[in-house]
Amino acid sequence: MRGLAERLDDIAGQAKLYDVTDRAIRGADRRRRTRRFAVSALSVLAVTCVIGAVSVLRFGGIGRPEEGPGRLEGVPPALVLPLLDTPARGSLAGDTAFQSALLDRVVKDPEAYGLPGDRSLLRVLFAGDLPGNRRLVLIAGVTARPRMIHLTGRAGTAARKLELTGWGDVEEPVFREEWRDDDNRGFALVFGPAGYDVSVSDRPRYLADGTVTREWQPEPSGYVMRDTSRLPPGLRVRISRGTDVFYEAKVASPGTKQPGTVDPNPLHGRGKAVPRAAQAAADALAYSSGLVGPGIRYVVLWSDDLAVEDPNGTGTGTGQVATVMALTPEGGGPYLTVVLDASPEPNARTHPTAEGVLGDPDRSLIVMRMPHFTPSPSATLQIVAPPSAVRAEVLGAGALLKATPLTNGVGHVDLSAPVEVTVRAFDAQGAVVAERQFTDAVRSAGLEPEVRGW
């Protein structure tokens, strides 16, 4: 199996592809980081695209950070200035001698780090030991085009021995990072500007009406740091001030293994059984959601063969697609769609619109842009409606754009992205049995929507 860094290089060249791994999704929007800090790739069939990619970093490659205007002086953008003015977090936040030694390194050779040589323009945003036997230091420059660097090593490593393993642009006011090895040991880290309340929630209840209920608990440290080998199902972070939510998103995938083999037969005969894709989607959904155990049932909502076009050629042919839901005792649950190509060892894709939360699957409507392997988005909007639905209409700005018959509630229309539409499903008597808004303007958010208040 190829290393993660190589796989990220491949994905980075195809900006609109969505690979079925947490880190690969982030990699599609980033320049490559150094191989020394990368971890080995997990099986593409065992993981899922689900961390909303909010990291402020766009990692550089091996060597020195590139130079450019605004790197060494100027006023930072107002959006990120509060993050840059945040006091250091982490277990070494109070170790002034350690931080001073770090800044001495930068000031003595600023060109090696791509940061200003003026100590007053440097900020240590994080310094500490993390699960996975890691030590991480984040240093940023307070400039017009602020850069942040990673210095890393094993837990306990002295300041002078930490290695520069990544750098990138500070573009957003929330930082998040995840590192884990092949045994799922590592850390997930999220923090934002000072002056906000930080709270967390896990083990949500997915109700039959499609809503999600959560209980939130304060995070006294002011940032979220978790051991990836011990993540509970559905862990989310909220950064807020009063009733105003500044940021809310999933922390990281629990990495849970889906026990046993999923029944590949789709509910109500929607499509045909495709065991390989059904199992891939179930494994990915379990990895992402952490939902396993008594009362949790993985069901295939729709599956079928699918013609796949692979720009590299190796995967072109008849692939498979499956939408799988983790049905909880409360009657609802998250779902995820996976497309496999025709390769002997199939590659997988999902899409930000092909995941989410449903209520009762017999009453719910899914509308999604089909996952694809080509650089351009698929024109296909797939509809999976209640089994009683025989027809669907797609409306934009109140006007009918497309209509299609449905078989057991399943059909599709061709409508090129981007669109913002309403989809209605009708039964044989002409009554609306389900309705849903659809937009291509969504981010991969981890099953539940990401909230950005900036």
Image: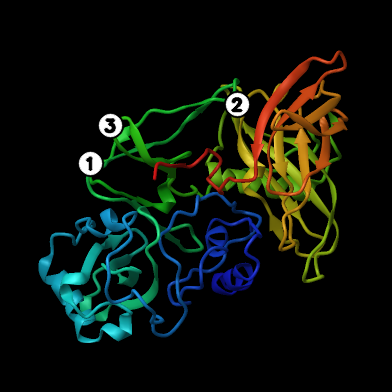
Q: Which mark is residue 242?
A: 3
Colour scheme used in the picture?
A: rainbow
Label 2 SS = loop
Residue 409 against residue 18 in the figure, above or below: above
Name the spot of residue 5 as percent of width and height, x first: 54, 73
Residue 448 against residue 67 in the figure, above or below: above
Q: Earlier in the sequence, mark 2 or mark 1?
A: 1
Label 1 SS = loop
| Corner quadrant of residue 313 | bottom right
Question: Within 10 angstroms of label 3, few (less than 14), some, or many (20 or more) residues?
Answer: few
Q: Is residue 187 visible?
A: no
Q: Is residue 49 visible?
A: yes
The amino acid type found where label 1 is placed reads: Pro
The amino acid type found where label 3 is placed reads: Gly
Q: Along the horizontal axis of the image, is 285 left or right of 270?
A: left
Q: Which quadrant is home to the N terminus?
A: bottom right
Q: Along the horizontal axis of the image, is 440 left or right of 96?
A: right
Label 3 SS = loop
Q: Along the horizontal axis of the image, is 307 left or right of 281?
A: right
Q: Which mark is residue 220?
A: 1
Q: Earlier in the sequence, mark 1 or mark 3?
A: 1
Name the spot of residue 447 as percent of width and height, x first: 56, 40
Question: Within 10 angstroms of label 2, few (less than 14), some, or many (20 or more) residues?
Answer: many
| Corner quadrant of residue 158 | bottom left
The amino acid type found where label 2 is placed reads: Gly
User: Pointer 2: what residue?
Assistant: 332
